[in-house]
Image (spheres, rainbow, N blue to C red):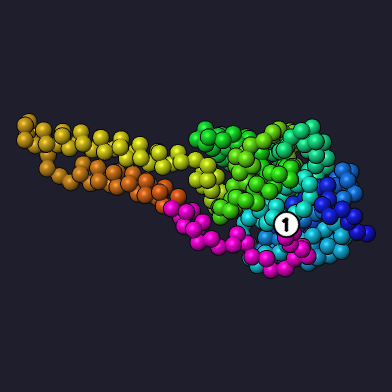
């Protein structure tokens, strides 16, 4: 069995991290979905430094000519893994889907049909999210609504990376070299005609999620700092506000000391003021530091990822 077309109709990019138990069912369902669209397709798995037998399982399935894999030298992160898949996929249309089977592969055909109505991006919007804690649902909902308010781009609410995009969107994304990727924001930023299909997100079939709260916080910071300068404006405005407050406190102190002479010597009020103002200053410095750190990472111009092994041939 061989691919007869150099550029298949559809590529499905799947970042994987410790998903050996899910891959067999995932492969079967992705294959059926892709074949319902075209006989010319590719499944591109990106192994993001898995510690289990994920790579061995991927090598087994790579006997299928439609399956390609990339394996990183270490864990570089979900968004980087997706970016690598976008760099190496060759399909005319590209689907991004996670390996945990919470996003149903059967929805891919619906996304494809919708794309062919004249859209360049069709994303899957979650109606419900099964198997997730109340805290995770609440924080995710709050984050996307805050991000929507403080950014100048329209990032869809209640969506993940599960979507289908046209080839021209892929080519534009591949020209965006920033180190701290926030792909759903980048895809919204490029524009073109975009729409969505709603679905119910299922519970994870097997394994554990790789998205810890620490990674979620880092991901949120990447999203905010990549598409909004609101934190910098907030730090500036807060600095001005407390400078004004401090000025009036200083005037009141001088008035009490030299005019009314109604004051109590002591250190309490002084220490409270210093600590409070100092705390605000540290917050401002921290926010500025986050932006400078990201600038520094981009200036170093290190590769986004390092490939240990792969059965992909470079498109160039």
Q: Quadrant of residue 202?
A: top right
Question: Which percent across, then down, holds residue 121?
Answer: 71, 38
Report how many numbered discs are placed on residues in the image: 1
Relative to 20, is 248 on the left or the right? left
Q: Is residue 304 magenta?
A: yes
Span highlighted in magenta in the image:
292-316
* Residue 32 seen in the current view: no
Furthest toward the right, the residue is 1
The reply, left or right, for residue 83 in relation to residue 280 is right
Q: Is residue 307 magenta?
A: yes
Q: Image point 53% across, 35% down: which residue?
A: 152
Residue 146: x percent and y percent? 52, 35
Looking at the image, residue 167 sits to the left or right of residue 244; the answer is right
Task: Identify residue for label 1.
Answer: 88
Q: Which percent across, then down, holds residue 285?
A: 37, 49
Where does the C terminus fall, quadrant-wise?
A: bottom right
Image quadrant where residue 270 sits:
top left
Give the vertical position of 280 relative to 215 (above or below): above
- Where residue 19 sits in the image (x, y, percent)? 74, 57
Describe the element under mark 1 as helix, strand or loop: helix
Q: Quadrant of residue 143?
A: top right
- State the residue at coordinates (87%, 64%): 63
Residue at 16% across / 33% down in the picture?
A: 252
Of 222 and 177, the residue lying toward us: 177
């Amino acid at each position: 069995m061989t691919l007869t077309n150099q550029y298949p109709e559809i590529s499905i990019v799947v970042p994987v991290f410790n998903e050996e138990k899910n891959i067999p069912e995932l492969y079967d369902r992705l294959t059926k979905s892709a074949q319902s669209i075209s006989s010319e397709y590719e499944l591109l798995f990106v192994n993001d430094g898995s510690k289990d037998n994920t790579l061995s399982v991927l090598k087994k399935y790579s006997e299928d000519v439609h399956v390609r894999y990339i394996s990183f030298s270490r864990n570089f992160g979900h968004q980087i893994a997706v970016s690598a898949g976008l760099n190496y996929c060759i399909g005319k249309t590209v689907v991004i889907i996670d390996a945990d089977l919470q996003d149903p592969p059967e929805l891919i055909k619906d996304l494809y049909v919708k794309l062919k109505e004249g859209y360049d991006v069709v994303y899957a919007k979650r109606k419900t999210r099964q198997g997730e804690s109340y805290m995770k649902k609440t924080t995710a909902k709050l984050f996307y609504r805050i991000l929507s308010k403080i950014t100048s781009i329209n990032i869809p609410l209640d969506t993940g990376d599960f979507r289908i995009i046209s080839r021209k969107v892929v080519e534009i994304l591949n020209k965006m070299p920033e180190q701290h990727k926030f792909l759903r924001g980048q895809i919204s930023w490029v524009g073109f005609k975009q729409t969505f299909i709603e679905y119910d997100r299922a519970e994870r079939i097997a394994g554990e999620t790789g998205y810890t709260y620490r990674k979620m916080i880092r991901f949120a910071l990447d999203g905010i700092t990549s598409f909004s300068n609101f934190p910098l404006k907030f730090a500036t405005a807060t600095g001005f506000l407390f400078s004004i407050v401090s000025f009036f406190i200083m005037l009141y102190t001088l008035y009490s000391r030299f005019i009314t002479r109604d004051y109590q010597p002591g250190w309490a009020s002084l220490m409270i003021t210093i600590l409070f103002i100092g705390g605000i200053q540290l917050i401002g410095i921290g926010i500025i530091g986050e932006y400078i750190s990201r600038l520094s990472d981009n200036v170093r111009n290190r590769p986004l990822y390092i490939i240990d092994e792969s059965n992909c041939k470079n498109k160039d």
